[in-house]
Image (tube, rainbow, N blue to C red):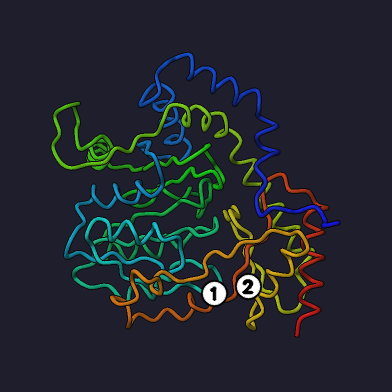
């Protein structure tokens, strides 16, 4: 008989604990017969703006659209360059390509998986209009270093906060420091909807107005379109359900940090394993270890056979994807390329039990000990 499967993410405990409140919100929206850009969406925008400490929040239908609309609102397009990380989900670079700009990939820091400001500085040109740092796996980037570069060189910062809602660096929540912060509420995120959903946040009144116009087919007033925009609106149902969850996000993020600390206690002395650091503000969207020596895929296969789910985020650096292979043939990001061969994300969610972590850690340690 196969052992019980441990998934990489279990949303069941969260849904069960808040079932009544979620169901009440669902019924409230259903009975209102108002499903797009209504009171729930406006309330969520205000609540998230207050939580992050920004003037504006603009609800959208995905985190990908948040990136697209941020770049469009900044006037970035053909002939422009945008520097970002090669170690992220494709949407980060895809948005740059969507607006007609050129993605430029700078390498990552070996200890954080985040974009390296020194590598960014080396790639700046007169065509650089923006930099997109990604707060990967919930660990905040070195925003002070990026801001210092932006002040000296005149580019805009667009923060990709898809995996980092609620993360803190230097007392400030991520997303509040750049021209835009781009949020995703995809079901696997720390603050998650029940389908695709996203949001832009900004402190700039003019940028907020442009973003709102772009999300509604390029119109400030219905039937008075000013440019080609998007159909990208956060539905009332998602907004209502997110409003139920938002007050719990700090507790859930703290639960993830406790889980990370438990993994450290179990795995801290295991040879052949590099653990992610536990630092201020890291909210552990993923608990991603490194397994050097070309053993990662074999370790993953043996964990899977033991009933333990894991994920590889990300197996191919963006500059090595087919779509960018030709245009970025000369691009070299050795730190990201090495990470793609070594990373493995272990099961983590806010309510994960000590026993479950012990099972995962013990199995992983045993697998590593049995491999040459």
Left or right: 278, with 243 as reference point: right
Mark 1, other Cα within 10 Å: few <14 / some 14–19 / many ≥20: many
Question: Going 40% across and 23% down the picture, which residue do you hit?
Answer: 35
Q: Secondary structure at mark 1?
A: helix
Q: Position of residue 362 (x, y in %)?
A: 82, 65
Q: How many marks?
A: 2
Task: Name the residue tied to disc 1.
Answer: 339
Query: Which of the pair 282/363 is nearer the observer?
Result: 363
The answer to which quarter of the image holds residue 137 is: bottom right
Give 214 or 308, whichever is nearer the viewer: 308
Find the residue positioned furthest to the front.
1
CA separation in Å, label 2 and label 1: 7 Å
Which residue in the rendered view is the most extreme toward the top?
Answer: 31
At a point 61% along the width and 62% down the height, the residue shown is 311
Of the numbered discs in the image, which one, if any, rests on residue 246? none
Question: Which quadrant, please, contains the N terminus?
Answer: bottom right
Label 2 neighbour load within 10 Å: few <14, some 14-19, many 20+: many
Residue at left 75%, top 65%?
305
Coordinates of residue 229 in the picture (x, y in percent): 22, 41
- Outermost residue on the bottom side: it is 372
Q: Position of residue 186 (x, y in %)?
A: 50, 44
Residue on which disc 2 sits: 290
Q: Is residue 64 above or below residue 45?
A: below
* On-image quarter of the C terminus: bottom right
Q: Is residue 110 above or below residue 355?
A: below
Q: Position of residue 236 (x, y in %)?
A: 43, 26
User: Is disc 2 placed on a helix, strand or loop?
Assistant: strand
Left or right placement of residue 36 versus residue 359 in this view: left
Going 82% across and 72% down the picture, which residue do you hit? 366
User: Is there a contact, CB below 8 Å, between mark 2 and mark 1?
Assistant: yes
Q: Earlier in the sequence, mark 2 or mark 1?
A: 2
């Amino acid at each position: 008989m196969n052992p019980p499967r441990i998934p990489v993410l279990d949303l069941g405990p969260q849904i069960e604990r808040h079932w009544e409140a979620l169901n009440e919100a669902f019924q409230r929206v259903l009975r209102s017969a108002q499903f797009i850009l209504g009171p729930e969406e406006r309330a969520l925008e205000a609540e998230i703006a207050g939580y992050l400490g920004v003037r504006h929040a603009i609800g959208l239908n995905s985190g990908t659209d948040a990136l697209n609309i941020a770049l469009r609102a900044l006037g970035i397009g053909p002939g422009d360059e945008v520097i970002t990380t090669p170690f992220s989900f494709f949407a980060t670079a895809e948005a740059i390509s969507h607006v007609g700009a050129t993605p430029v990939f700078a390498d990552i820091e070996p200890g954080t998986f985040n974009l390296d400001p020194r590598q960014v500085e080396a790639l700046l040109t007169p065509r650089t209009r923006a930099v997109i740092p990604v707060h990967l796996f919930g660990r905040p980037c070195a925003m002070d270093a990026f801001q210092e570069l932006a002040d000296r060189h005149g580019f805009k910062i667009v923060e990709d906060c898809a995996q980092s809602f609620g993360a803190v660096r230097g007392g400030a929540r991520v997303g509040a420091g750049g021209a835009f912060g781009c949020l995703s509420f995809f079901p696997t995120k720390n603050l998650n909807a029940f389908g695709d959903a996203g949001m832009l946040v900004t402190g700039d009144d003019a940028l907020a107005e442009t973003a709102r116009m772009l999300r509604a087919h390029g119109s400030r007033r219905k039937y008075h379109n000013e440019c080609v925009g998007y159909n990208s609106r956060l539905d009332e149902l998602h907004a209502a359900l997110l409003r139920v969850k938002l007050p719990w996000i700090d507790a859930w993020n703290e639960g993830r940090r406790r889980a990370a600390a438990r993994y450290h206690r179990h795995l801290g002395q295991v040879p052949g394993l590099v653990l992610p650091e536990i630092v201020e503000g890291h909210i552990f969207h993923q608990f991603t270890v490194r397994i050097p020596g070309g053993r990662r895929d074999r370790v993953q296969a043996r964990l899977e056979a033991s009933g333990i789910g894991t994920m590889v985020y990300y197996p191919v650096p963006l500059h090595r994807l087919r779509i960018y292979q030709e245009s970025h043939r000369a691009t070299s990001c050795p730190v990201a390329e090495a990470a793609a061969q070594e990373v493995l994300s272990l099961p983590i969610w806010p309510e994960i039990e000590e026993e479950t972590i012990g099972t995962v850690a013990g199995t992983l340690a045993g697998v590593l000990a049995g491999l040459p």
